[in-house]
Amino acid sequence: MTRCPGTAGRMFRFLALLTAIVAAGSISPAVAAAEANAAPAPAASALAADARIDPVQEPPKPDAKPAESKPADAKPADKKDEKKEEEPKKDRFFAVKGGVVHTVSGGDLRNVTVLCKNGKIHAIGAGLEVPKDAEILDAAGHHIYPGLVAVRGTGFHAGSNPDDGTDVFSLNMTLGLAAGITTVLSGDAVAKMTFGSVEDMVVRKEPLVSLNYATRSPEQRRKLRQSFDKLLEHIRKTEAYEQEVKTNKSAEKPDDKWIKGENEKYLKLLKREAVAEIAADTAHDLHEACDLAGRYNLRMVVRSAYEGWTIAPELARAGVSAVVTPRTRVDADELRSRANGSSIENAAILYNHGVRLAILPPGLSVSTWGVVGEDLTHFNMEAAFAVRGGLPQDAAIRAMTLDAAKVLGVDHRVGSIDVGKDADFCIVDGDLLHYMTLTRWAVVNGRIAFDREKDTLLSHIRPGGDVNAPAPNDYWPRRLGADWTAEPGVPATPAKPETRASAP
Amino acid sequence: MSRQQATGHRQQAMGNGQLSRARQEASFPCPQAAGKREEPRRRGTFARRFTIAIAAVLCACTSALQADDSPKLAFIVGKVLVMDKTDSVINNAVVLVSGGMIEKVGKQSAVQVPSGYRRIEMPACWIVPGFVDCHDHVVGSLSDLNDMVYLTNPGLSTLDTVEPHNSNINRAVAGGVTTALLIPGSGTNMSGFGTVSKTAGDSVADMVVRSPGSIKIAQAGNPERYWWGVGRMFMNFNTRQTLEKAKAYHEAWVKFEKGETKEKPAFDPIFDGFRGLFARTFPASVHTQIYQVVLTTVDMLARKLDIRTVLDHSEFDGWKVAPLIIEAMAKGHSIYTIQGPRAYHLDRTQRKIHGNAARWWQAGNPLLGINTDAPVVPQEQLPFQAAMGCYYGWIPYEGIKGLTRIPAEALMVDKEVGTIEVGKQAEFCVWTGDPLDPRSSCEVTVIHGKIVYDAKLNRRF
């Protein structure tokens, strides 16, 4: 059932890239991108979406007629591929109708259709014409939010190459989707919960460069600053060389062979091409992190930051983003001569000072041992606790969607419902931050990845919103094989003797 | 048992050194809100002690003064969840508090606020009875959680570990929890007597409501690890034989007290504490979970020994015992199901997530509550535990009932707390909305008619 693109698929992508480049000749990428991000976007602007080129993103998916727009100088393909190219690749349309669309980036829309084409949001509008062969999801009475983005999660994907080893039918992935999560930083890759498929799973690799800048390891801190200084010197020398080489052809290019491994990552940080991630929780560590960000002009995310509320203006001035867990409990140390410890108001205070927030619960997995509400199984509840501390509700939702995507540098793909972005939705049966709200569907890349009524895990809980629905049947003895799908009230048949035959 | 008795216990306890912190705390007149925690330090120690001494003398001498000690408060709020047996809710209400008790509850149009009352106007807020947590380990010091000396330790009591103003209960108060049953851990089959305590108070005597509050019994699912060779057969034998000895002791004394025999039984400090259990003045808190174990608990304790039984945890597929429990209730046995901290059970054979509270409720168990097993779940998250129960199929009003009236009945403190009714202790919280919703916050907590937490001064949760 995995939908892995083969050689032909890769060729399609290559051609699509060329197509896009040709198309970009008439529409500048900036305009296309701006149009794509406009929300609520009229149907017309959706046309530009396919031509959009994103520097970080992989090339867009194959367009309707790739063979027609094949440029003359395209790389010649072997015969086998040529044949397949000529078959027109069918566009995959998916539409969500009804319900309230919470775009996150541009307010809430009612009575609109969200039309998706090949896994991207193609158009949003009222009275859109939906292609006949489109898969239509009737979400009337539901709320459509962008798929939630967890800036860290464990147990969903495999290793550093999620598309090479993830069990796409795992219980964890289903539980993550049931929590409304569609994108998560797993290991060092931003990956999606593409249930049943590894196609288009990885959004971005190595979005963050982790730095150890804890105050308790001064030696490490000194070494890091030394590396940064050396690299800054190298940047200056390179700039000087580039000037000099214009007049003096024999100018000597500075040696850059030593810039590899960590130094290569650091260089990206100093050029602001990558984002530094620092684990800093106390005011002391946070102050040092801000100092580092200011001294070297870094883009930075601080993780934990439970004392952020004590130095919020400094964090705001340094332009760092914060990943917070509003429920963190750390007692104040009364011997410190300043405010310290955790505060339920942390998120609200940081927000009021303009610090970009992403929210994470205390646990980063979807544990099944029974104590719930502490991890990503109830991701939305952590945002609710931030609201308790004074964070506005829309900011709390942004901290699980668009702002979380910005922290990971994937906001051009996910985090809001905008034309051109990935068709990832979390469709729920009520207010996203209410404790009884259940995810009805999770959509990833324009495909239904979780349907609560079709999966037995949670289907018996308030089916159709009925709080008085009867309990599901229990079966005695418990291991009865295939009978567990029996209707409530219908007695189960006894186990067949052969079910035990294979037991040792 | 009265607070005076608890004081006696406290004085005994003071001798053993564990309560040195409690003693220190007791000598600090902690202000009503922690926001003023620095305040006592600014004043001179001698002056403070002297003032307290004077105040104590005055209080002891004049009973009238003692009544005045509690402020007169008038809460003007948007909604009062009374949580009584008629399930009444009063909108635009006034709650008058004086002498530590609820003096009047009614609509703003019907109840005049007399002069001399401090008006607390929070028209958008709700008053909800203080929550009662039947399974708590944080009112006392956590290092004394499990004294695993023998496999049954019938003489021990958590009263010796109560720690006023510890950081966990300071948060609990901010989460709306006002009464908790401090019980020892489940490392042994019988780990000692629990203590019903308030979550605020300047001394052990201030806090403790009843000691013993319960006897903690761990039926299975932890005591096995006590030592090799401890299995369910031995554990059940051991628990049963201890209880039967205690019952025989109690019956011998009853016989003597009724004058049926002149032979005075020998005093036994181990079994004397059990007399209330068999006189049904306090319940057994039973660590029990999984179908077979809950079955044993109901059969052995509730039915055969006729002990008031509180089923703590009651997780996994424990709800399958519900029909048996309802049958036992009909025969007059007392069984309360106080569920938690696990809110759900993943049934791997059916690929279903069952909400534990939901399944107990759907099975028709009328006496259902929720616990935290703090610190397993932080105690301030007790209402959130009920919210999680609701996510998995329970309903909110039942959830709030399972935090207030039902656990108060389970602990036999329902004459004092658990509802907002005239004549009960003023023990409630003012919430910004539905208390189960993590977005709502507890703004004010009142215990014994005094404001013990005010979020405006120092928000703790």
Image (cartoon, grey):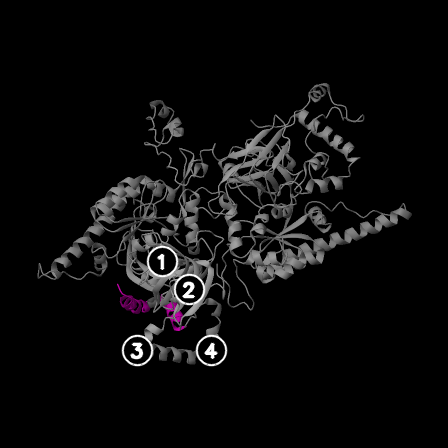
Q: Nearer the viewer, mark 3 or mark 4?
A: 3
Q: Is residue A337 above or below residue A253?
A: below
Residue A331 location in percent, x, y? 49, 61
Q: Which residues are magenta?
A: B1-28
Amino acid carrying mark 1 in the image: Ala
**Mark 3 falls within which chain?**
B
Q: CA distance from mark 1 to mark 4?
A: 33 Å
Q: Name which of mark 1 and mark 4 comes first in the sequence.
A: 4
**Mark 1 falls within which chain?**
B
Identify the mark at residue B43; answer none if there is no mark.
4
Residue A240 location in percent, x, y? 84, 51
Whether residues under marks 3 and 2 lie with C-beta atoms below 8 angstroms apart, the answer is no
Q: Are marks 3 and 1 on the same chain?
A: yes
Amino acid carrying mark 4 in the image: Arg
Q: CA distance from mark 3 to mark 1?
A: 31 Å
Q: Are marks 3 and 4 on the same chain?
A: yes
SS for callout 2: strand
| Apparent side of residue A137 relative to residue B269 in the rendered image (left or right) | right
Nearer-the-camera pick, B46 or B15: B46
The residue where tag 1 is placed is B180
Amino acid carrying mark 2 in the image: Phe
Is-magenta flag for residue A407?
no
The residue where tag 2 is placed is B75
Q: Identify the residue at horizontal 44%, vertical 62% (top origin).
A: B444
